[in-house]
Amino acid sequence: MAVSGAETRAVIGGVHVVPSILSADFARLGEQVQQVLDAGAREIQVDVMDGHFVPPITVGALVVEALREQMAAAGAVIDVHLMVERPERQIDAFAAAGADHITVHFEATPHVLYALEQVHSHGCTAGLALCPATPVSAVEDVLDEADMLLCMTVNPGWGGQAFIEHSIPRLRRLRALAGPEKPIQVDGGIDPATGARCRAAGATLFVAGSAVFGAPDPGVAFRAIADAVGESCA
């Protein structure tokens, strides 16, 4: 069983590092996920790519289903980032598979409000993501429907990209627009140094893929970023 909606809101409302399994060794996925859970991770991100919205193809709902019991046993959140065209066609499947939180892209559908409402209809929290070239003002009319905003700090589609420097002023503008309480996630090129800079600019959730799962010990790498952004993993 997935964690409750209230528990998910409590997690995404805190300051947390969110390891992304995009960079994990899928032959050892359960083991590597457990390493970061044991190190204090409260949330894991599953990056879903369809070969259309972004060029690569990654994973589907079966991976979420495979992680569901392990994550629920740890009281941790499965955060699904849908980098897919027309996400409203996929939300039902990922919610049924065990997603606790689902993020859709502003650029991926003409029906952003409908997609966010569809996520909520399953008892999941909903995120709205912006690509680096999308004006932060795009979220203004749907702020109340999005439980979290995701400011991409690389172009979506590939792990291991370099952090885009203009993300810092974008984050400041997004925080000013969203107000002090709205969770803001960053994703792309996040390590201890960039994570600390994003935290100072207003981010509260920090997705890290290659910096965590590309390290010899993912748990140690997770803690290094968590310490840099001021997360308590006690």
Image (tube, rainbow, N blue to C red):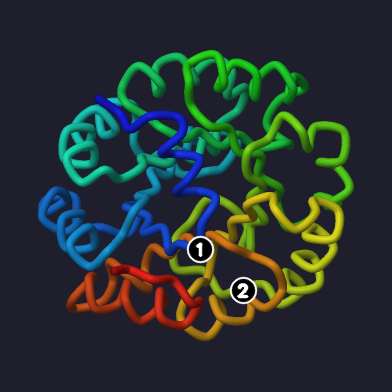
The N terminus: image quadrant: top left
| Drawn side of residue 186 relative to residue 109, left or right | left
Mark 1 packing: few (<14 Cα in 10 Å), some, or many (20+)? Answer: many
Mark 2 packing: few (<14 Cα in 10 Å), some, or many (20+)? Answer: many
Residue sitting at x 68%, y 31%: 108
Identify the image quadrant of residue 162.
bottom right
Q: Nearer the viewer, residue 170 or 15?
A: 15
**Label drawn at residue 102:** none
Residue 65 in the image: above or below residue 176:
above
**Label drawn at residue 15:** 1
Of tags 2 and 1, which is closer to the observer? 1
Residue sitting at x 48%, y 20%: 123
| Drawn side of residue 105 relative to residue 134, left or right | left
| Drawn side of residue 161 relative to residue 44, left or right | right
Q: Which residue is mark 2?
A: 199
Q: Amino acid at mark 2?
A: Arg
